[in-house]
Image: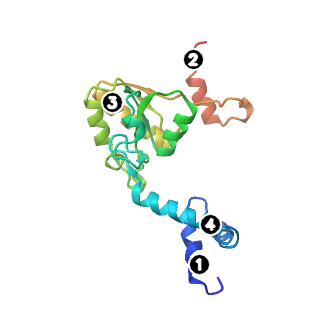
Amino acid sequence: MSGSRLIGRLIESLRCLPGVGPKSAQRMAFHLLEYNRDGGRQLAEALSMAMEQVGNCSECRTLSEQTICLLCSNDQRDRSLLCVVETPADVQALEQSTGYRGVYFVLMGHLSPLDGIGPEALGLDLLEARLASAEVKELILATNPTVEGEATAHFVSEIARAQGVRTTRIAHGVPMGGELEYIDGGTLSHAFAGRQEV
């Protein structure tokens, strides 16, 4: 870009974000440089601080500034309920949308042998140790309803079963406000198979 190494580096750096291609990165860089330099400085400071100070909770593995995150250190949470999710974003979604009062375990991904992601990468040894402590009475599987998410849920349920821990899976199916004719076959089949008495 007109010989500017710094602008080129900024554009290339912005491309590390998911869904940001060359044109989007260029648009963001120019917006910050032309119209919002204060916002750019705040963004740079926030990024720098987060990269230095945010790590993983030693209990649930979510992202946290503290060694033990606020959810895990909250003595009002029910430690007998443990919800397994794939990402910290899943924790946020559940906290904002449900009345769940238990604690979490964040896998930071899902099983994917083709990508070299096995049980050790997901911290399943830590989960197994936590289940062995006999504090957890119910393990709630809230992995994504994808092939990898289902395989991960099955693998985790086997670990829980070996420890004698009751295991449940969040329901999947027709979304609220959805119309049956527009629902994909896999979702509709799963919802039909999981029907409940009313």
Residue shown at the point (60%, 27%) measured from the top left: 191
Secondary structure of the residue carrying numbered label 3: helix
Residue shown at 62%/87% (left/top)?
A: 3
Q: Secondary structure at mark 2?
A: loop
Choose between 141 and 57: the one closer to the eye: 57
Pointers 4 and 3 in contact (C-beta within 8 Å): no
**Mark 1 crowd level (few <14, some 14–19, many ≥20, 10 Å Cα):** some
Q: Amino acid at mark 1?
A: Gly
* Marked residue nearer the N-terminal end (3 or 1): 1
Residue designated by label 1: 8
- Whole-Å distance between the Cαs marked 3 and 1? 50 Å
- On residue 160, the disc is 3
- Alpha carbon of mark 4 to alpha carbon of mark 3: how far? 50 Å
Q: How is the image coloured?
A: rainbow
Of badges 2 and 4, nearer the viewer stands 4
For the residue pair 47 and 25, the one nearer the viewer reads as 47
Of discs 2 and 1, which sits in the foreground?
1
Callout 4: SS:
helix
Between disc 2 and disc 1, whose residue precedes? 1
Q: Residue at x 48, y 34 (%)?
A: 142
What type is the residue that disc 2 sits on?
Gln
Instruction: Determine the CA span between mark 3 and mark 2.
Output: 24 Å
Q: Is residue 101 visible?
A: yes
Q: Earlier in the sequence, mark 4 or mark 3?
A: 4
Q: Which residue is mark 2?
A: 196
Q: Mark 1 or 4, which is nearer the eye?
A: 4
| Amino acid at pointer 3 | Ala
Distance between mark 2 and mark 4 Cα atoms: 54 Å
